[in-house]
Image (tube, coloured by chain):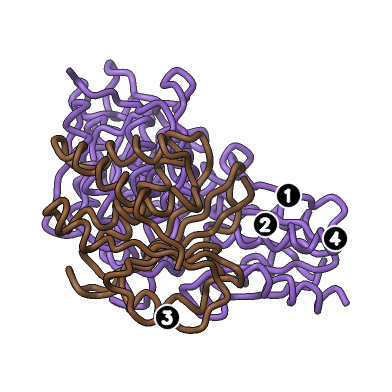
Chain colours: A purple, B brown
């Protein structure tokens, strides 16, 4: 009997399993990857599950080819992904730039680990937050989403494929070793309740020069290979038809700006935050990923002491939820940024605040270990006293 | 059920982390509750330390780590050395009394079951010692109902080994003693 694509029901599973099942539920039918702790389980599960539902998994010889394979599969019309950890992202950066330049729908899961370099494979550190946004050369814009629970790893994969296909862009899922290896209740809904928008596909009749395959702020229909179309796809500077053009300043300008504007002009559909008790808060915690759970635990302790604390969790990290951060700064006198790193998102958050509130930062006592709620409350007491 | 924090610790190969996963699955999949499990182990395949931390609750769990467990299950002397001091005051300690021979002064309720010798002598299967510990825990300080734990064991063990594991679980349930 064929295995179902969507495993509806309650499961007690690790985040990396939930990530895999989220991908399948989102219609993923191609994945390539190279094993790396703490992301290997995703590749293992995908290798087992994709063939059961008519999909393909390739264990490639390295991360570079994994990312390239996924890009190729996407151009062949597949919902494609790759999965790795920070060292793999470093290797993929060149092809990530290619995907951004060619407006390729692609989901890249980064189960972040302790670094730099080989660091500590099994310990989570959300230390790739900037490298996924700015790691490849040139100017471009990606989307990055940060899950905080195994359940969120399922849910965010649905969203990641939805956004990748809708906006023809690489989307990063910024998990970490904690969420990836933590085991919790994962509730998978009925397949009919899951909605993933598909990409716009170019009509087969017209020629390359009659079609607009690229550089449309409202997302150009994609010429999918294998459907009878001829298309020209190049990562070099190209015009709206995809034709290489290295001489016209207007084309160069559009080649960079239009794919960026394509994402920024749809930021209201892309940016999602979770606000908890911010309305009367004098201090708002800003956080993302697993650490946001420490923030809520601290918030509950603080509220029990009548300390007016709220939290803004960034589910979307890129594009940065600038308006939401600014609004939080207008509500509260103090913002406390919690990250499991030395402050990677901090300068970007501070720029959005623009002096409207005092911005504080707190990392864990030991990097790689998350903040203890009691320790956060001690800092909050000090700030509010 | 209030929130219960549990540490299940042993030496790599004893199945401590699997036992924790079985408990979490019993609570979540078969009991309709919530549980959060984290774990740590050294890189040796056998012989290094292994431990898992599980939070059980009726409601979704916010902070995912266990700082001071209510219950410590120790399958090895090493587990006592590492984790006895983390057990909260008036907490509950379960130990494999064949293996744990030295206890520090602890303000805790203590229970023992000779899991290793029962596994070896009665079942000729040393691997079921962790399931015997689950039986002991479920008798004295259940974090999930007995039938839920039994269903989770059946879901976790190889086909054909269900009866053996059910007997091991029952043996732990019967043989646990206050120390």
Classify 10 Å Cα crowding around label 2: few (below 14), some (14-19), many (20 and above).
many
Residue A198 lies, in percent from the top left, at 40, 26
Whether residues under marks 3 and 1 lie with C-beta atoms below 8 angstroms apart, the answer is no
Q: Report, in whole angstroms, how far the alpha carbon at label 2 lies from the one at label 1.
A: 8 Å
Position in image of residue A79 (x %, y %): 30, 34
Instruction: Give the residue drawn at x 47%, y 56%.
Output: B54
Q: Nearer the viewer, residue A9 or B14?
A: B14
Asked whether residue A130 is in view, the answer is no
Q: Gap between marks 2 and 3, in whole Å?
A: 37 Å
**Mark 4 vs mark 1, CA separation in Å:** 11 Å
Residue position for label 2? A296
- Mark 3 chain: B
Image quadrant where one finds the N terminus of chain A:
top left
Name the secondary structure under disc 2: helix
How far apart are labels 3 and 1 at the CA level?
45 Å
Which residue is nearer to you in this view: A111 or A132? A111
Q: Residue at x 27, y 40 (%)?
A: B166
Q: Secondary structure at mark 1?
A: strand
Residue sitting nearer the eye, A209 or B81: B81
Q: What's the distance in space between the residues labelled 4 and 3, CA to CA?
A: 45 Å
Is A277 on the left-hand or right-hand side of A190? right
The answer for how far apart the CA atoms under marks 4 and 2 are is: 13 Å
Q: Residue at x 43, y 60 (%)?
A: A178
Above or below for A360 versus A228: below
Foreground disc of the pair 2, 1 = 2
Q: Are marks 2 and 1 in contact (CB under 8 Å)?
A: yes
| Mark 4 belongs to chain | A
Which mark is nearer the camera, 4 or 3?
3
Q: Check disc 3 and report the residue beneath it.
A: B103
Q: Which residue is mark 1?
A: A276
């Amino acid at each position: 009997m064929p295995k179902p694509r969507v495993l509806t029901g309650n499961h007690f599973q690790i985040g990396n399993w939930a990530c895999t099942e989220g991908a399948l539920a989102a219609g993923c039918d191609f994945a390539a990857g190279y094993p790396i702790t703490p992301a290997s389980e995703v590749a293992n599960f995908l290798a087992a599950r994709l063939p059961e539902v008519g999909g393909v998994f390739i264990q490639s010889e390295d991360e570079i080819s994994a990312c390239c394979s996924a890009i190729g599969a996407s151009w062949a019309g597949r919902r494609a992904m790759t999965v790795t950890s920070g060292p793999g992202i470093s290797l993929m950066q060149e092809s990530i730039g290619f995907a951004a330049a060619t407006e390729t729908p692609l989901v890249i899961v980064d189960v972040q680990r302790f670094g730099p370099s080989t660091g500590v494979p099994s310990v989570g550190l959300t230390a790739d937050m900037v490298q996924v946004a700015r790691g490849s050369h040139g100017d471009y814009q990606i989307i990055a989403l940060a899950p905080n629970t195994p359940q969120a790893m399922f849910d965010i994969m649905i969203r990641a494929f939805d956004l990748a296909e809708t906006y023809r862009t690489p989307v990063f899922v910024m998990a970490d070793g904690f969420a990836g290896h933590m085991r919790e209740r994962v509730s998978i809904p009925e397949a009919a309740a899951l909605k993933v928008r598909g990409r716009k596909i170019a009509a087969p009749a017209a020629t390359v020069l009659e079609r607009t395959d690229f550089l449309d702020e409202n997302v150009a229909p994609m010429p999918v290979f294998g459907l009878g179309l001829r298309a020209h796809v190049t990562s070099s500077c190209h015009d709206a038809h995809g034709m290489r053009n290295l001489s016209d300043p207007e084309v160069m300008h559009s080649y960079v700006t239009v794919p960026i504007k394509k994402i920024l002009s749809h930021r209201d559909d892309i940016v999602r935050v979770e606000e908890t008790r911010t309305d009367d808060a004098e201090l708002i915690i800003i956080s993302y990923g697993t650490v946001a759970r420490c923030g809520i635990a601290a918030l509950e302790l603080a509220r029990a002491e009548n300390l007016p604390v709220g939290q803004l969790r960034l589910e979307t990290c890129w594009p940065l939820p600038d308006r939401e951060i600014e609004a939080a700064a207008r509500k509260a006198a103090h913002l406390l940024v919690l990250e499991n790193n030395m402050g990677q998102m901090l300068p970007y958050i501070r720029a959005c605040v623009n002096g409207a509130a005092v911005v504080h930062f707190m990392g864990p006592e030991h990097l790689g270990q998350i903040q203890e709620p009691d320790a956060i409350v001690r800092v909050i007491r000090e700030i509010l006293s | 059920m209030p929130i219960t924090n549990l540490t299940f610790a042993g030496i790599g190969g004893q199945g401590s982390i699997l036992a924790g996963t079985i408990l979490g699955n019993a609570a979540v999949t078969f009991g309709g509750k919530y549980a959060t499990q984290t774990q740590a182990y050294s890189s040796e395949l056998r012989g290094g330390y292994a431990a898992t931390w599980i939070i059980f609750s009726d409601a979704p769990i916010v902070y995912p780590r266990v700082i001071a467990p209510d219950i410590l299950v120790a399958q090895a002397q090493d587990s006592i050395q590492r984790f006895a001091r983390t057990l909260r005051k008036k907490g509950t300690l379960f130990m494999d009394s064949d293996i744990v021979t030295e206890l520090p002064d602890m303000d805790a309720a203590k229970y023992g079951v000779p899991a290793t010798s029962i596994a070896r002598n009665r079942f000729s299967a040393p691997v079921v010692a962790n399931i015997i510990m689950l039986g002991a825990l479920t008798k004295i300080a259940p974090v999930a109902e007995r039938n839920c734990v039994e269903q989770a064991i059946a879901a976790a063990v190889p086909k054909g080994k269900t009866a053996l594991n059910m007997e091991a679980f029952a043996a732990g349930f019967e043989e646990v003693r206050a120390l």
